[in-house]
Image (tube, grey):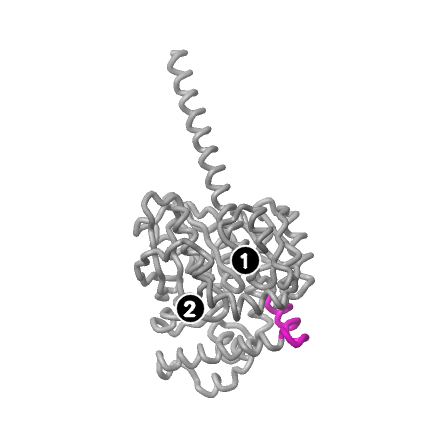
Amino acid sequence: MLKSIYNPPFFLKNGAAMTAYTALLAGRNWENTTTDPEPTYQQVVFTGGQDVPIFGLVAIPKNAHGTIIGTYGITGELKQQWFLRLLGRKAYAQGYAVVLFDWRAHGKTAQLSPTLTSDGLYEGEDFVRIATEAVRMGCPPKCWFTGYSLGGQLALWGIKAAQDVKSTDIDFAGGAVICPSLDSLRSLNYLVTHSFGRYVESRIAGELKKLAWKLHDHHDGYFDPAAIERANSIWGFDEELVISRLGFNSVEEYYQASNALNLLPELQKQTLIIYAADDPLFHPDIVDDLKAIGEQNSYLDLLVTKYGGHVGYVSSKKCQSQFQDPDRWWAWNRILQWIEDRQFTEDVHKNNQNNQNKLSVLSSSLEN
């Protein structure tokens, strides 16, 4: 497990406070916290798994040296996902091609297809196919997958899916995620046991219901209005609208199948997981399980911090100065630094290997 000391401002040293601040307040002035401009994005419709159309945005800087592909959490759409757009600005400014996308049943992807979410079971293939098409468009072939919250779970499934791809054209290097959902069944049961969790669950459920009605409006006759009316919780959304289309008999069965915690021992590509011990949305016991898995899998780099809340990680000024970060967005800065370090290490390794090969050829020539 990696060691890194993160500290927020004193008034955000509480998981619920950090989560509420990030969700409700930080997005109001986020553009003032960065000097990096918005890239000029090209709108693209990718073809995901099962030939589902996926709407995305692509920006390729001059002399790009890698590609970062990412999506967001359980609800929302690209145009209002400021935290993901912040990554887009930062990554582009550091020389990465950026691919951001509306995942299944979200944003413009929802307008293109009535296909519902699967919490990673099919979204993993979406990541791989999007990367493949992006490289064909001119993005660098070294691809990194990223996301946060439920989007982090999807990215982990993407890393797993990439392991099964036999390709010499694309380097599926790995991925890095922030506060990924790792055990939906355990965490959802935990979420509704405390007042803040019940508030969050209620808000998410309301957004999911809106999402379902938007899908109904875009694809008239595809969804049963009565089922949408009954979907008054996260569990209810999956029970009424999702599981039968995926072939599951129960929500429990679905959550067990999509459980990302079970994926981690199988990952064989470089993966960074940033996870806060005070995340109020996830069951606290998951931290110990995550650490135990990390000790057994050398491909996993874990940054488990005392503070951070759910997808927050706003740095104090002292913390920002300590890490010499350009802004207060600690988690994105660590991810970009981690990716850069691995790209540099691999480039050095390749150069050394090339030099050794040249020496071997020269030595062979001299002997002859």
Which numbered disc covers residue 66? none
What element does badge 1 sit on? Answer: strand
Q: Residue 136: percent from the left, percent from the top? A: 31, 50
Position of the C terminus, as image quadrant, is top left
Q: Residue at x 66, y 77 (%)?
A: 195
Q: Residue at x 59, y 55 (%)?
A: 316
Alpha carbon distance from label 2 to label 1? 19 Å
Q: Residue at x 53, y 69 (%)?
A: 23
Mark 1 residue type:
Ile
What element does badge 2 sit on? Answer: helix
Q: Residue 310: percent from the left, percent from the top? A: 58, 64
Which numbered disc covers residue 80? 2
Mark 2 residue type:
Gln
Magenta region: which residues? 184-197
Main SS category, magenta section: helix
Q: Residue 52: percent from the left, percent from the top? A: 37, 66
Please say whether residue 337 is one of the residues in the magenta stretch.
no
346 left or right, relative to 64: right
256 left or right, relative to 113: right
Residue neighbourhood size for the residue with mark 2, other residues' Cα within 10 Å, grouped as few (<14), some (14–19), many (≥20): few
The vertical placement of 71 against 354, above or below, is: below
Which residue corresponds to mark 1?
A: 178
Which comes sooner in the sequence, label 2 or label 1?
2
